[in-house]
Amino acid sequence: MKSDKKFKRKCVACSQYKDKQDLIKITKTKEGEIILNPDTLTHGRSVYICKNEECINLAIKNKKINKALKSAVSQEILEQITIKN
Ligand SMILES: [Zn+2]
């Protein structure tokens, strides 16, 4: 487990390590812009959430994203990550 941890990212909601492709990434740039699933050239403070409804809802409900990024995440971003059935 320990050796592949560096290739995985931790979900902010369930605290489990997952492969990058199973996670949504939200990055806050140095300029303070919040970007959903940024390209690899975008650097900043990032937060990862599993691509499942439970983790997304939990992260939004508990304001985990805001806390992790130390910034308010716009409703627009939150709506984009919310899985709609
Ligand atoms: Zn999760």
Image (tube, rainbow, N blue to C red):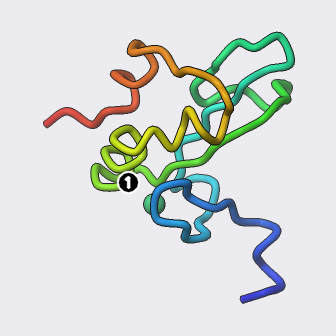
In the picture as drawn, the residue positioned furthest to the left comes out as 85
The image shows residue 56 at horizontal and vertical percentages of 37, 45
Give the vertical position of 72 relative to 43 (above or below).
above
- Which quadrant would the C terminus be assigned to in this image? top left
- Left or right side of 58 for 14: right
Point 85% across, 29% down: residue: 43
Question: How many numbered marks appear?
Answer: 1
Give the vertical position of 74 relative to 58 (above or below).
above
- Left or right side of 13 for 70: right
User: Regarding ligand 1, which quadrant of the image does it lie in?
Assistant: bottom left
Residue 10 falls in image quadrant: bottom right
How many residues crowd mark 1 within 10 Å: few (<14), some (14–19), many (20+)?
some
Residue 75 falls in image quadrant: top left
Front residue (pair 33, 81)? 33
Point 55% across, 54% down: residue: 12
The image shows residue 82 at horizontal and vertical percentages of 31, 33
Task: Identify residue type, mark 1.
Answer: Cys
Give the vertical position of 58 relative to 82 (above or below).
below
- Left or right side of 43 for 37: left
Residue assigned mark 1: 55
The image shows residue 36 at horizontal and vertical percentages of 57, 25
Question: SS at mark 1?
Answer: helix
Give the vertical position of 3 relative to 79 (above or below).
below
The image shows residue 28 at horizontal and vertical percentages of 72, 25
- Which quadrant would the N terminus be assigned to in this image? bottom right
Point 70% across, 12% down: residue: 33
Query: Disc 1, ligand 1: is the CB inside 8 Å?
Result: yes
